[in-house]
Amino acid sequence: MEILWNEVQQEIPDGTTVSEFLIAHDLSPDTVVIELNDRIPGAENAKQILRAGDRLDIFRIPSKS
């Protein structure tokens, strides 16, 4: 199925959760902010299953230096 990830069509397996998507792209939930369908879900939504047509925007949090 396809979702829109940071403005780019992305093919992902059916049943992929938000956290599985992050793992597949080597992204840590501690270093990003997630916006799903124009909403910022809470931490409990990491288990949310992505659906065809979802819009997922991921923003990296700058590290403190």
Image (tube, rainbow, N blue to C red):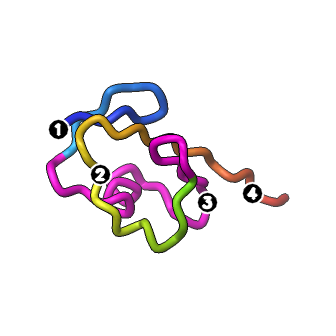
Name the foreground residue: 3 vs 25.
3
Q: CA distance from mark 2 to mark 3?
A: 20 Å
- First to last magenta residue range: 13-39
Q: Earlier in the sequence, mark 3 or mark 1?
A: 1
* Residue at the right extreme of this rendering: 65
Q: CA distance from mark 4 to mark 1?
A: 33 Å
Mark 2 vs 1: CB contact within 8 A? yes
Q: Earlier in the sequence, mark 4 or mark 3?
A: 3
Return the residue at label 1.
1
Mark 2 vs 3: CB contact within 8 A? no
Residue 63: image tag: 4
Please state the horizontal and vertical placement of residue 53, each as a whole percent of the image. Answer: 29, 35
> Residue at left 46%, top 42%?
37
Q: Judging from the image, what secondary structure is the residue with disc 2 in?
A: loop
Q: Judging from the image, what secondary structure is the residue with disc 1 in?
A: loop
Q: CA distance from mark 4 to mark 3?
A: 8 Å
